[in-house]
Image (cartoon, rainbow, N blue to C red):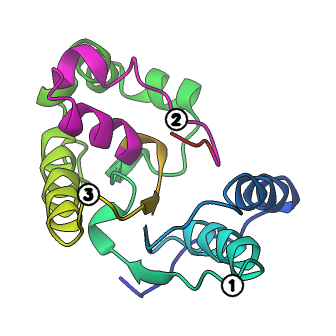
Amino acid sequence: MPSEYGNPLNRNGLSQACALGHALSKVKIHHIYTSPARRAVETASQICLWTDACNMPIKKSVTPELVEMNYGILEGFNGKIAREKYPDLFKTYYQKPSLTFFPKGESVAQAYRRVGFALDEILAAHTCDENVLIVSHGAVMSFIFIHIFKLDLDAMFHAIRHHNSGLS
């Protein structure tokens, strides 16, 4: 995979990223880790624009393990069409995510382990007095919460929602 992939931020995404940057403008961020997705990298850059204005240089790292879950054959489908075309896959996905494997993609459990490994590496690289920001994707953010709080993957995967440019 190239260092960056995917679509750039659209007008709404850029507005959300700017608002997030403004909200974080007075926070000393020591390091930003991003998914290699172009929209994540652009969001991190917007955050840096706001904090750089306050003379707070930030180290940035693109972290491939923070990429969104690979939905394989479902990539590009909207939810309704995917549910109609692959009803058994969706039944498992909603009832027992940990047992779901997306053909030509990855399993929910594989993605969870990938993100957990990356998070452990990130946390090990920093002290408790450093502020670290992760810019990634919805499923990845759910995995991070599940991993940090040692929650049940099946019970919490669909319960935790993180919206575009959400701050937690």
From the viewer's perspective, is 143 left or right of 51?
left
- Is residue 10 positioned above or below 12 on the image? below
Q: Let me know if residue 101 appears in the view.
A: no
- Disc ID at residue 94: none
- Is residue 6 positioned above or below 164 on the image? below
From the viewer's perspective, is 33 left or right of 166?
left
Determine the residue positioned at 51% across, 70% down: 37
Q: Which residue is mark 3?
A: 128
Q: CA distance from mark 2 to mark 3?
A: 24 Å
Mark 2, mark 3: which one is toward the viewer?
3
| Figure quadrant of the N terminus | bottom left
Q: Label 3 crowding class (10 Å Cα cut-off): few <14, some 14-19, many 20+?
A: few
Residue 106, horizontal then vertical, whole percent: 21, 51
Q: Quadrant of residue 104?
A: bottom left
Query: Could you say whether the residue bearing mark 3 is in a helix, strand or loop?
Result: loop
Determine the residue positioned at 26% across, 66% down: 65
Q: Quadrant of residue 41?
A: bottom right
Determine the residue positioned at 38% across, 21% down: 158
Q: Let me know if residue 7 appears in the view.
A: yes
Amino acid carrying label 1: it is Asn
Residue 84, horizontal then vertical, whole percent: 47, 21
Indicate yes or no whether the magenta region holds residue 150: yes
Amino acid carrying label 3: it is Cys
Tell whether label 1 touches label 2 (CB within 8 Å).
no
Residue 39, horizontal then vertical, whole percent: 62, 67
What segment carries the magenta color? 140-165
Q: Which residue is mark 2?
A: 162
Determine the residue positioned at 58% across, 86% down: 57
Q: Which residue is mark 1?
A: 55
